[in-house]
Image (cartoon, rainbow, N blue to C red):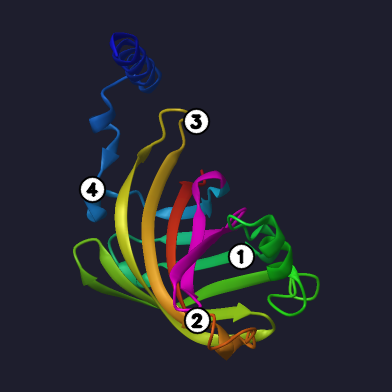
Amino acid sequence: MTRTLATTATVAAILVAIAGQPASAQTTAAPADVQGGTYQVEPGHTQVGFSLLHFGFTNYSGVFSNVSGTLTLDPKTPSASTLNVIIPIASVQTTSAKLDEELKGAQWFDAAQFANATFTSTKVTVTGKGRATVSGTLSLHGVTRPETLQVRFIGAGVNPLDKKYTVGFEATGTIKRSDFGVKMYVPYVGDAVELRIAGAFERQD
């Protein structure tokens, strides 16, 4: 236990030294203080998680990664902000390697024919401090439909490791996979898909 605490303290000290100042001074939770400008998705810490009911027994989850895209952020006029993200379908991952391959196949997402899913915002509506509704178009499996995400600002500041100014959000929403032609095993495997997205963006100088 003593060794574990010592190791933890050492790691914390290293991070503070790298940052050059206390970690609490590196981030802001005030949306109005965020730096405006053009941001790019930081793929290493951006995840598109999904969950759906599996045969009425469990909520089964998976994730997409290697996301790319841009965010134009205007803290003074949030409604003027825009978002465009690209999600590689072949990045899908669950706890089953066999299922991962099935999901990439023609009966599900058909990654060979429809390599990417894209979301492009069309409207940003502030709903509270650090919160907004982002409406846009989602293209998936060859179908494009309007969808809406509920977005919450997490924080912003200089990443102490790579020294890049970073802003982070969490987004949630629900889509029906059958609306996009992904109908395998409906209704036994749920049609409603819950999305939970962790989005990290780095400011471009």
* Camera-nearest residue between 24 and 39: 24
Relative horizontal placement of residue 171, taking residue 27 as reference (left or right):
right
Q: How many other residues sit within 10 Å of disc 2, few (<14), some (14-19) or many (≥20)?
A: many
* Camera-nearest residue between 168 and 91: 91
Q: Nearer the viewer, mark 4 or mark 2?
A: 2
C-alpha separation, residue under disc 1 versus residue under disc 3: 23 Å
Q: Which residue is mark 1?
A: 86
Q: Amino acid at mark 3?
A: Asp
* Camera-nearest residue between 188 and 175: 188
Give the label on residue 180, or none: none
Give the label on residue 190, or none: 2
Q: Give the magenta-colored segment's residue range.
A: 44-70
Q: Are marks 4 and 2 in contact (CB under 8 Å)?
A: no
Q: Which residue is mark 3?
A: 162
Q: Are marks 2 and 3 in contact (CB under 8 Å)?
A: no
Q: How many other residues sit within 10 Å of disc 1, few (<14), some (14-19) or many (≥20)?
A: some
C-alpha separation, residue under disc 4 versus residue under disc 1: 27 Å
Circle nearer the N terminus (2, 1): 1
Q: Quadrant of residue 11?
A: top left
User: Could you tell me which secondary element the residue under label 4 belongs to?
Assistant: loop
Q: Quadrant of residue 131?
A: bottom left
Q: Are marks 4 and 1 in contact (CB under 8 Å)?
A: no
Identity of the residue furthest to the right in this view:
112
C-alpha separation, residue under disc 2 versus residue under disc 3: 41 Å
